[in-house]
């Protein structure tokens, strides 16, 4: 858990569940919990790493402290769990990543980098003959971190819907059974999502991008449109530049980008 205080909140856990609390970014705490499992519980057969912490902002404004905060929960936690369980016959070692680590998300450079490390770690484990799976999750609904925030509505409007927990858990089972090292699990309306890139859809999305229409014919050098109003041309150019800036900055639908706003 990322939260301090009570180790468990909400409905009572079913019989047979044991809760232990510790900071996954602290190697000593992880070793203590593994030792407690060894002393009182059946042999450990699987590890699921779900911890995470955010420190969002434009890349140029990210500090070393911002990166350290995000990496402590995601990367240090994963490495500590691996170090504490190395040599054990695990059936599963599952890392909960984020779609930000695979397809990006505005303002989440640190989050994207940390989750990309989890993907590389899963591949490295499989290359060594160990179980390893990183799931780059889209946003969960009902109980997810963004479900009750404005970000949830923005994601849905952009084509990345919130997943029902039941659907996500069913996908989790299929992901574990697949034997793959890294998978994206998200409810994405690809045409709507990729429309946010305008005409410059990255090649990464070639497998899911809709076919592009043929580009309009360009006027030859020296040619002008008969009767064109220079003021209308300037207005059209201004609208085009504003739209491109909004696309690059991933300005949300309905948000206004002032034309005199310094970049």
Image: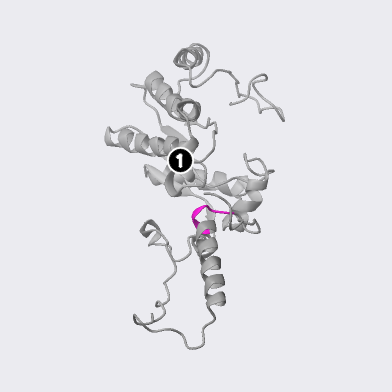
Q: Which picture quadrant has residue 14? A: top right
Q: Of residues 168 and 112, which is closer to you in this image?
A: 112
Q: Position of residue 16 (x, y in %)?
A: 61, 24
The residue at 44%/37% (across/down) is 115
Q: Of helix, strand and loop, which one carries label 1?
A: helix
On screen, 24 above or below 203? above
Instruction: In the displayed orientation, state which residue is furthest to the front.
Output: 230
On screen, 205 above or below 134? below
On screen, 196 above or below 102? below
The colour style of the image is one colour
Within 10 Å of the Cα at label 1, are there few (<14), some (14-19), or many (20+) other Cα atoms?
many
Q: Magenta segment, principal secondary structure? A: loop
Residue 248 painted magenta: yes
Can residue 161 be seen here? no
Q: Position of residue 235 (x, y in %)?
A: 56, 71
Is 224 displayed left or right of 230 in the figure? left
Q: Which region shows up in magenta?
A: 247-251
The residue at 42%/72% (across/down) is 212
- Residue named by callout 1: 112
Instruction: In the displayed orientation, state which residue is furthest to the left.
Output: 128
On screen, 202 above or below 69? below
Can residue 135 be seen here? yes
Quadrant the N terminus occupies? top right
Is 143 displayed left or right of 170 in the figure? right
Q: Which picture quadrant has residue 86? A: top left
Q: Of residues 50 and 194, which is closer to you in this image?
A: 194
Q: Position of residue 197 (x, y in %)?
A: 48, 60
């Amino acid at each position: 858990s990322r939260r301090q205080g009570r180790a468990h909140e909400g409905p009572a856990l079913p019989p047979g569940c044991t809760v232990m609390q510790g900071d996954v970014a602290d190697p000593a705490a992880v070793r203590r919990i593994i030792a407690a499992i060894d002393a009182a519980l059946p042999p450990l057969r699987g590890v699921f790493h779900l911890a995470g912490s955010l420190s969002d902002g434009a890349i140029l404004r990210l500090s070393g402290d911002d990166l350290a905060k995000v990496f402590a929960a995601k990367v240090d936690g994963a490495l500590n769990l691996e170090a504490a369980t190395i040599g054990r016959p695990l059936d599963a070692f599952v890392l909960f990543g984020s779609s930000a680590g695979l397809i990006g998300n505005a303002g989440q450079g640190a989050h994207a980098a940390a989750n990309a490390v989890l993907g590389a770690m899963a591949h490295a484990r499989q290359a060594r003959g160990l179980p390893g799976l990183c799931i780059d999750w889209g946003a969960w609904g009902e109980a997810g971190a963004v479900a009750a925030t404005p970000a949830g509505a923005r994601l849905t409007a952009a084509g990345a819907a919130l997943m029902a927990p039941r659907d996500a858990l069913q996908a989790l089972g299929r992901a574990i059974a697949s034997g793959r090292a890294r998978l994206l699990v998200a409810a994405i309306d690809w045409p709507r999502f990729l429309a946010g890139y305008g005409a410059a859809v990255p090649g990464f999305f070639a497998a899911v991008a809709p076919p592009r229409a043929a580009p309009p014919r360009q006027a030859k050098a020296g040619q002008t449109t008969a009767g064109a109003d220079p003021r209308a041309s300037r207005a059209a150019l201004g609208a085009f530049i504003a739209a491109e800036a909004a696309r690059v900055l991933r300005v949300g639908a309905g948000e206004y980008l002032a034309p005199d706003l310094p970049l």
